Amino acid sequence: MKQIKFGLVGLGRIGKIHFENIRLNCENASVIAVSNLSLDNVKWINKRGVKHIYDSFSSMMLNDEINAVIISSPTSLHSEHIIQAAGAGKAIFCEKPIDLSLERVKKIHALVKELKIPFMVGFNRRYDPSLMKVKSDIKNGIIGKPQIIKITSRDPEPPSMDYMKTSGGLFLDMAIHDFDIACFMNQQKVISVYSSGTVFGNPNIKKLGDLDTAITTLTFENGSIASIDNSRKSAYGYDQRIEVFGNLGITASNNKLADSHYFVDSNGIHNSNPLGFFIERYSESYLLILKKFIYCLLENKEISNNSRVGLNALLISLAAKKSFEENRVVELYEFDN
Amino acid sequence: MKQIKFGLVGLGRIGKIHFENIRLNCENASVIAVSNLSLDNVKWINKRGVKHIYDSFSSMMLNDEINAVIISSPTSLHSEHIIQAAGAGKAIFCEKPIDLSLERVKKIHALVKELKIPFMVGFNRRYDPSLMKVKSDIKNGIIGKPQIIKITSRDPEPPSMDYMKTSGGLFLDMAIHDFDIACFMNQQKVISVYSSGTVFGNPNIKKLGDLDTAITTLTFENGSIASIDNSRKSAYGYDQRIEVFGNLGITASNNKLADSHYFVDSNGIHNSNPLGFFIERYSESYLLILKKFIYCLLENKEISNNSRVGLNALLISLAAKKSFEENRVVELYEFDN
Amino acid sequence: MKQIKFGLVGLGRIGKIHFENIRLNCENASVIAVSNLSLDNVKWINKRGVKHIYDSFSSMMLNDEINAVIISSPTSLHSEHIIQAAGAGKAIFCEKPIDLSLERVKKIHALVKELKIPFMVGFNRRYDPSLMKVKSDIKNGIIGKPQIIKITSRDPEPPSMDYMKTSGGLFLDMAIHDFDIACFMNQQKVISVYSSGTVFGNPNIKKLGDLDTAITTLTFENGSIASIDNSRKSAYGYDQRIEVFGNLGITASNNKLADSHYFVDSNGIHNSNPLGFFIERYSESYLLILKKFIYCLLENKEISNNSRVGLNALLISLAAKKSFEENRVVELYEFDN
Amino acid sequence: MKQIKFGLVGLGRIGKIHFENIRLNCENASVIAVSNLSLDNVKWINKRGVKHIYDSFSSMMLNDEINAVIISSPTSLHSEHIIQAAGAGKAIFCEKPIDLSLERVKKIHALVKELKIPFMVGFNRRYDPSLMKVKSDIKNGIIGKPQIIKITSRDPEPPSMDYMKTSGGLFLDMAIHDFDIACFMNQQKVISVYSSGTVFGNPNIKKLGDLDTAITTLTFENGSIASIDNSRKSAYGYDQRIEVFGNLGITASNNKLADSHYFVDSNGIHNSNPLGFFIERYSESYLLILKKFIYCLLENKEISNNSRVGLNALLISLAAKKSFEENRVVELYEFDN
């Protein structure tokens, strides 16, 4: 390929980010088609212009000009879209999680491997410049061998109840990013998971069997440990911190603050709160992950965050959910058949 | 006006920023014409598209569709362009400094006032979100009455010798931003200026009669004082800090760091350096100042950083230069007739 | 009492801190006797002066002038000394942990309650000025209801193997401080404990059945959760951080740095490492806890960190140890009979 | 000498710090005599014990056992006490400023040189651990050649009017410390001084001819520049910062905060204010300067902050005062005869 021509399905918040990033900031790539456009988005898409608009994903897949797809449709439709795109031989960029069902994700993993479909799962945080520096410190031996990984991941507000109903819950929808980052940093196999959690906010979350507050401990094969704390509601805004402790020191990423203003009065020194929400905080990584995908396709390079990565993160998320539900340590081998 | 249609002259680094900001991020505005395009920029402009390309600024001014101009040409051409644009009744956005000659700036100030031309000088830092918070703290009485203003403004690298030859020198080209910000924050008249400075870097700078290092003290009418330190070369990158001390405390803006990564080892805690250069640091303010200009034109609002603001900053810069050259305190009234 | 006259047993590192704090900084109190003086300490004590030196703790207890004791002897002797002091009617300040045996601590708890002996356990960190501010923020509702508590507690170096043999291990010797602080902040009953841990340093630690790295999750009755990470060896020095997250925000204590120096070069911004070890970091709290003990005795006030507090922290520590050994979640009620 | 036996005159705040530091923390030294004890201090001194109490400084000087003096009497008495101590052959530690009169300080400088009296002026900040690191960074070439020095020095509250009447004013009493530190860091000769200042607080300060707010620019022989800002009243407490900018970067000392507590809520991130006042902030340097003095006497080493250092700082202070009074740049050579 010399030029990536994308078909895109799903113009929610994240689909729009991808669309705009390709339109404004990616060389050698364009979105030439979208499908399943909601009425709300007709105006949005007309303003920006797109060559083809399809009623269905399957008809879009018949367009031979398209050589890659972006799947940012609701999670429940991912597997269907992946299977069609794979069948049509398109390269696939799919938002996380690939699917809520372990069985289906295993099948997809087998399918794209068999068909040799280039496949990337949208764990964009791996491409955040600060997190990439954490990763490269680890690779370069700056902190020696990782021993303790701590991740704080708190949203400013819970999503709508409607969204939460089908999201898969805190572990599969939200913490899955953090589980992936822990594995990305440590490059070790998780052997057991323990989650303690509860609902402190809207009691309807409890009725869904979901939770809004959790701490999860991941134990890796070599004895290293990760602790991930999640909250759906943080009064001071989006909180995204990671710290990796090794025998030679720490490498870490702190919150990015909204601005560099501060003031000092008789009560103390006052700095601004963290930057907005994921759209602001991870604006760079949303662009960089796509650029990487495009680069891998154009240069025929292996994709590192592939379906195996998506499968691994799902397994840990399912184990965390089970641990919470059964109030016990869950070994990963329990999922092994 | 319902839609601002810009003619733009000068597609250097800053002209390009303005062009792209309008193209991608401003509603109700577009650049419909450019003039005096260099060969280098033909390709750049063709890629983005523009309705009209003119050989000369004067011929562009004949286009009645254009209702406003952006003047980001070399400083030596500003006054000519301003006079032509004013004659054609266009609203004017002009980069700083308006001109290096006090006489000419006074004339321009009189002209745009007489002709009632909406005029904005490009002191974009006034629209930096962090600096706007400093300003609003002062307005809201958070720090009481400003007493001491400290500004640190250091570039990562000096500009080319070619640029420096016509730039007007450190005070008129670089420190003028900081003098403007000091006045913006304090809203007091400067009565005297003292500058001490030297050349620590390239000795050719000295041959130009210019300098690369200076500390300037501004004394305001009510006794409050500003200290501005400038360097053309900072080993750790672009350094942009301001602190305003009043009887109730401090309001300030610190450097924005390049990222939120840090690491800790046996030598200490290590954070990243400040963000790039002015293009990165002030990306938001370059957009916001244009949005404000467009807003003022569309809504028929008064422009606060007008020709008087440009004249005031020039006066202080000239006084600083004189103070350095004559090694004495220069009173502003010396310039008054 | 109008004046506290202490008998002190155990002039190790911490015994010496207590001795000097009383000598130099406490009004209305003095150490008038020491017992079980090692040869090494004879010179040390002579230089400072003490009225009585006893061969045995029991003979010191016969001195009626003494109205309170400081027990900073090895943990294995605590219970013996406590029982003798209680029998002699002395007020008791005992270093943590009270004892490694749950049974013995329960007996001591019952004994001092029955005899109405004023008893304080040496959880000095409760009196650290920064931690006291965290506590008072919680009390004052600044962060609403605590939901997530995170404690990082890492030593610069492991203690000697000799010390570790009798210390009770990482949970009973080191993490017990952190468990106590978590309870102090949350004022909730712990219902279950999960610890994951390993040995990354000296393999002899493993031979002792001990560990040098652990993350412990405490789940409280109301669903709130604490995560405590411990390491015996931190390359960048003593690391003591706590963060309490509630529905209105965070209250926290960061590391105190060794000094306020920093430098900036082309590699970044470099700050100094945390302050020394516990003797430097908690110098204030070692003094303030004794002052509080003296105050409670003189003013006849109730002691808040009493034998129940010591018992509670021991229970959690034992549960953490069991959890680690059995690789499962341990419920606190398992210890209830 | 094998043991320094001090006579001390002047038990104000600083005299007491010296007395206690020697009593509690200095080996090989003791205060064996005090003179000119005020009634208020009799009780204070009795509690601590001192061998000899003299009515007059001159009679104290007759005691041959005394081999060094600490002069922390009011500034107006310094020269008299110095002359007597020098006549008696005692080593001299004298608080800053040596005297308010340039002539007298020149005479003292000549006298102690002629008589080879070990003489130290109490510029204790040179021994602050953070400032010593700034100094050693400069010495070690970490920042290359110093170009810009910035010092912020603000007191939480002005002293009493009674004190201010005889203090010599802001430049001789307060800024003199900062001028000394600027010279200590730069090791360059100051050639000119410019001060702008005013009174923002108590108008009685103006009646004294004094000021409470000033910015002073020092220009050094090699073109490097220092900017020092002073205020007698800072709403958020004692503010002590220094930053030295060189061609390779910055070395600096920030404020030490009162504690390591912070909290975060919907309004931002809130840290504690700077540590108390000079007694808390410079507690270490008050001890370390005395230890250095004692060390120099015992080991027969040269004293670096000697009478020449005191004279130099006074000259700059007088130049700053003159600059303020005459509203002009003052050249140091104006004082040269």
Image (spheres, coloured by chain):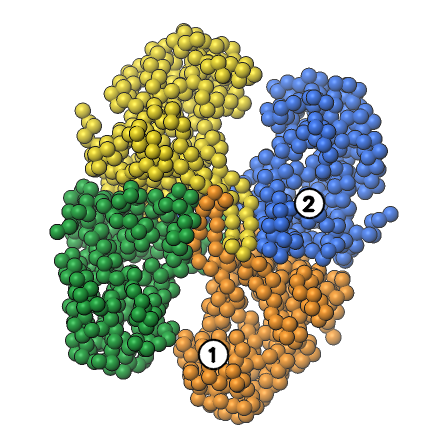
Chain colours: A blue, B yellow, C orange, D green
Local crowd at mark 2 within 10 Å, few (<14), some, or many (≥20)?
some
Query: Mark 2, chain letter?
Result: A
User: Which residue is at the front of the view, A302 or D228?
Assistant: A302
**In percent of the image, x 71 and y 42: which residue is there?**
A173
Q: Is residue A267 visible?
A: no
Front position in the image: C198 or D249: D249
Rounded to the nearest angstrom, the CA distance separating label 1 from label 2 is 51 Å
The residue where tag 1 is placed is C19
Residue B17, compared with residue D58, is above or below; it is above
Along the viewing direction, whichever of A265 and D336 lies nearer the viewer: D336
Lateral position of residue A69 relative to residue D245, left or right? right
Relative height, residue D164 to residue C25 (above, below): above
In the image, residue D7 above or below residue B34? below
Residue D3, image x, y percentages:
32, 77
Question: Secondary structure beneath disc 1?
Answer: helix
Residue, far right:
A337
The reply, left or right, for residue C336 in relation to residue C89 is right
User: Residue B298, position in %: x, y?
Assistant: 44, 19
Can residue D83 be seen by looking at this rendering?
yes
Percent position (x, y) of residue D317?
Answer: 22, 52
Q: SS of the residue at dot 2?
A: helix
Amino acid type shown at disc 1: Phe
Residue at point 59%, 83% (across, down): C82
Q: Dot 2 corresponds to which residue?
A: A184
In this view, the residue in front, C37 or A37, is C37
Residue found 34% across the figure and 25% down from its top = B165
Expressed as whole percent of the image width and height from the top left, the position of residue C187 reads 59, 64
Viewer-nearest of labels 1 and 2?
2
- The residue type indicated by label 2 comes to Phe
